[in-house]
Image (tube, rainbow, N blue to C red):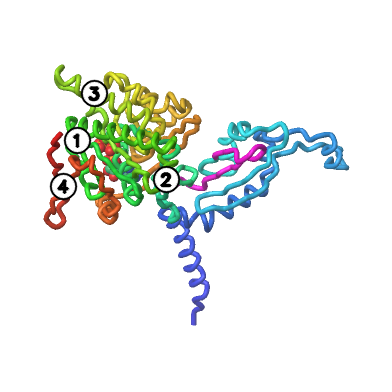
Amino acid sequence: MTDVTPWLELGTAAAGAGGIGYAKVRAPRVYWSLVGLPVTWGRFTWTYGSTMEVCGLTVQPSRLRAFMTRTVAHREVRPVPPKVRRVRGTSTGLVVTLRLPAGLEPADVAASSQRLRHAFGVQSVTVSETKPGYVELRMTGYDVLRRVRMPRTAKPRDLVVPVALREDGSVYERDYRKAPMSLTLGATLSGKSMYQRNLIKGLAQLPVGLVGIDCKRGVEQSRYASRLSALATDPQSAGLLLDALVREMEERFDLLALHGASDLWDLPEDVRPVPLVVLIDEIAELFLVTSKKDEPARDHTVMQLVRLGQMARAIGIYLEVCGQRFGSDLGRGATALRAQLTGRVVHRVNDKQTAEMGLGDIAPDAVSAVTAIRADRPGVAVAGDTSGGWSRIRTPEITPDEAAAVCREHADLTPELAFLDPFRPVIRSAPAKAPALVIPEPVTE
Ligand SMILES: Nc1ncnc2c1ncn2[C@@H]1O[C@H](COP(=O)(O)OP(=O)(O)OP(=O)(O)O)[C@@H](O)[C@H]1O
């Protein structure tokens, strides 16, 4: 009888290799945990000293240390690399905390991040200072942005919405307390609507009021009507809605004055008005005029937007503006408004000038990162912050139905706000499987 054991062993080995190959392509997170992480950890441990030396991340030791550590045989003094304080494996990479020796600063390590990336064979290395004298190296083992999956722990809370993943595997959150007014730019099909969709899905779960301005006749935002307190679908009703928001802002300021509070969060909970997020899709539509006689109305609308941008943070009204371009060519008031929108997310754009409009004033280094976004990677964007930092992010792919379902599920969180009643979208029940038809009520003002 033939012995089948070698064939069985061969089959098992082939199946194992096939499984690992499959995981590498289809489930990179699993592949990283099983193969990438142990290999990279080992490589890091065995080559750390020599890698830091060739990357120029060592310093000459102090005289005392040189005396204590010299090798007796050669009387040779070894340069000192940063001390490894902690190494932690994650589902996307390796996080290393380093204590810097005197003479090295975080910028030195950041400047060598490309060299470290190649030396340790990882997808990317980002460096951040955790406290004086300490830096954290976040190494990402694989291309996290190829297929984005948000960690299960990423849940919306307070006024913070997780919307995307950064290339180092960490979660990019839209925090309305830190960046109250924000601008999202991108060419057509770059992923702006997907970004807004993720945002609305998260915001819908929070105790906030959502106000939509979508002058493309509401094609994007009318799906979310069950969770919107107001929706304007043309420039005229958008103008009236913005007037109502400015009046509300003034009333909320009176309330702050009455209670001696400096912002919404200082007010006692029982009188505190609900925060409002105003989502404006395709901002250019508010600037466009077809005839000279429409110009005063356009200028008024833009001025109301600038006023909200300048002052509304304190009373809990936040602007989330989206568009393809945002420069002085839009018309009067455009640059004044853009200056108020300090949160910036820029998707693929058609020219360098648009990238500069989005990030040139707050994170100039990020402009070249925007121009490098590939057309076959929709949803990839560069998010800048006012401290000059930036990161490459990508939203998870979700369908409009998914976001609309979350809005319906949380419709009970939609606040009753009398001043927005004239703009409340009426949801007419639609035939099964067809999208809901939303007709905004006629504006009576
Ligand atoms: N994060 C993502 N992951 C995968 N695919 C994406 C992502 N974001 C967008 N896409 C895909 O790219 C295409 C365009 O996306 P989207 O509609 O969001 O672009 P847009 O910038 O809003 O375009 P437009 O200005 O024409 O409305 C869609 O087919 C969408 O599925």
* Residue wearing tag 1: 216
Q: Tell me residue 419's x, y (percent).
A: 23, 40
Rendered image: mark on residue 300: 3
Going from N to C along the chain, the mark reached first, 3 or 1, is 1
Q: Nearer the viewer, residue 229 or 218?
A: 229
Cβ of mark 2 under 8 Å from ligand 1: the answer is no
The residue carrying mark 4 has its beta carbon less than 8 Å from ligand 1: no
**C-alpha separation, residue under disc 2 versus residue under disc 4:** 33 Å
Above or below for 121 versus 325: below
Q: Nearer the viewer, residue 75 or 11?
A: 75
State which tag comes first along the sequence, 4 or 1: 1
Residue with the mark numbered 4: 426
Residue 9 placement (x, y as % from top left): 51, 70
Q: Which residues are magenta?
A: 126-146
Tell me whether circle 4 and circle 3 mark residues in contact (CB < 8 Å): no
Q: Which mark is residue 288?
A: none
Q: CA distance from mark 2 to mark 1?
A: 39 Å
Q: Which residue is mark 2?
A: 268
Amino acid type at circle 3 is His
366 is higher (above) or lower (below) than 439 = above
